[in-house]
Image (tube, rainbow, N blue to C red):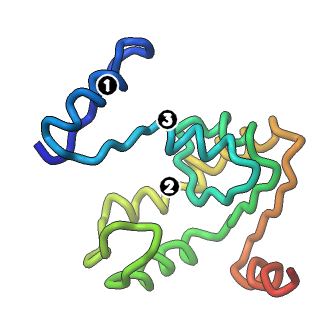
């Protein structure tokens, strides 16, 4: 046993079970609630990534600013290709080869994911939205602050 999930309904005793299991097998505990909810409850943070199917609305409720890097498909595909073989702080692995399924996801993003993002953003008028269509726009913003 190296990677273990303890799942169940809230109140089932997942944390209690985990605390009792941990000293017996000597693995570090990772509490998803601490990672997710504790991070959201902090007064300041930058959250990198869409994961639009993972409580996207709740994350939008907690944020005050969104930077939407709304780039064309080719720019995004080129970006993925340019990072191949590089160590990155946001990923615990190095992408060694092109993943066709991932590239297809990027190609479909403007039709499948982007409308959902735009709809969700429209339902959160409290958010300051920065929407950049090209990299140079984002770079100019970063240079200006």
Q: Residue at x 68, y 66 (%)?
A: 69
Q: CA distance from mark 3 to mark 1?
A: 12 Å
- Compared to residue 136, the image places residue 93 above or below, namely above
> Disc 1 and disc 2: Cα gap in Å?
32 Å
**Which residue is label 2 attached to?**
108
The C terminus is located in which quarter?
bottom right
Q: Quadrant of residue 135?
A: bottom right
Residue reaching furthest to the front? 23
Q: Quadrant of residue 18?
A: top left
Q: Is residue 107 above or below residue 95?
A: above
Instruction: Give the residue number, with chain letter if any, for mark 3.
Output: 33
Query: Does 139 sit left or right of 110 as displayed?
Result: right
Residue 30 place in picture, x, y as percent: 37, 43
The percent position of residue 32, horizontal first and vertical second, equals 44, 38
Callout in the foreground (1, 2): 1
Instruction: Kindly indicate whether the residue at mark 2 contacts the one at mark 1 (C-beta within 8 angstroms).
Output: no
Q: Residues within 10 Å of mark 2 (few under 14, many from 20)?
A: few
Determine whether 134 is above or below 3 in the image. Answer: below
Residue under the point 54% across and 55% down: 109
**Disc 1 target residue:** 7
How far apart marks 2 and 3 lie (CA) works out to: 31 Å
Among the 4 quarters of the image, the one containing residue 26: top left
Pick the front one: 4 or 132: 4
Q: Mark 3 or mark 1, which has the lower sequence index?
A: 1
Choose the circle earlier in sequence order: 1 or 2.
1
Label for residue 81? Answer: none
């Amino acid at each position: 046993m190296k990677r273990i999930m303890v799942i169940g309904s809230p109140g089932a005793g997942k944390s209690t079970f985990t605390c009792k299991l941990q000293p017996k097998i000597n693995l570090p505990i990772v509490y998803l609630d601490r990672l997710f909810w504790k991070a959201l409850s902090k007064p300041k943070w930058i959250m990198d990534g869409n994961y639009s199917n993972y409580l996207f609305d709740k994350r939008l409720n907690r944020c005050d600013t969104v930077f939407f890097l709304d780039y064309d498909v080719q720019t995004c595909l080129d970006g993925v290709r340019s990072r191949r073989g590089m160590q990155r702080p946001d990923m615990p692995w190095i992408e060694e080869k092109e993943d066709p399924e991932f590239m297809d996801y990027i190609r479909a993003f403007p039709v499948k994911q982007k409308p959902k993002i735009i709809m969700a953003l429209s339902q959160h008028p409290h958010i300051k939205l920065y929407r950049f269509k090209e990299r140079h726009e984002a770079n100019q913003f970063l240079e200006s602050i």
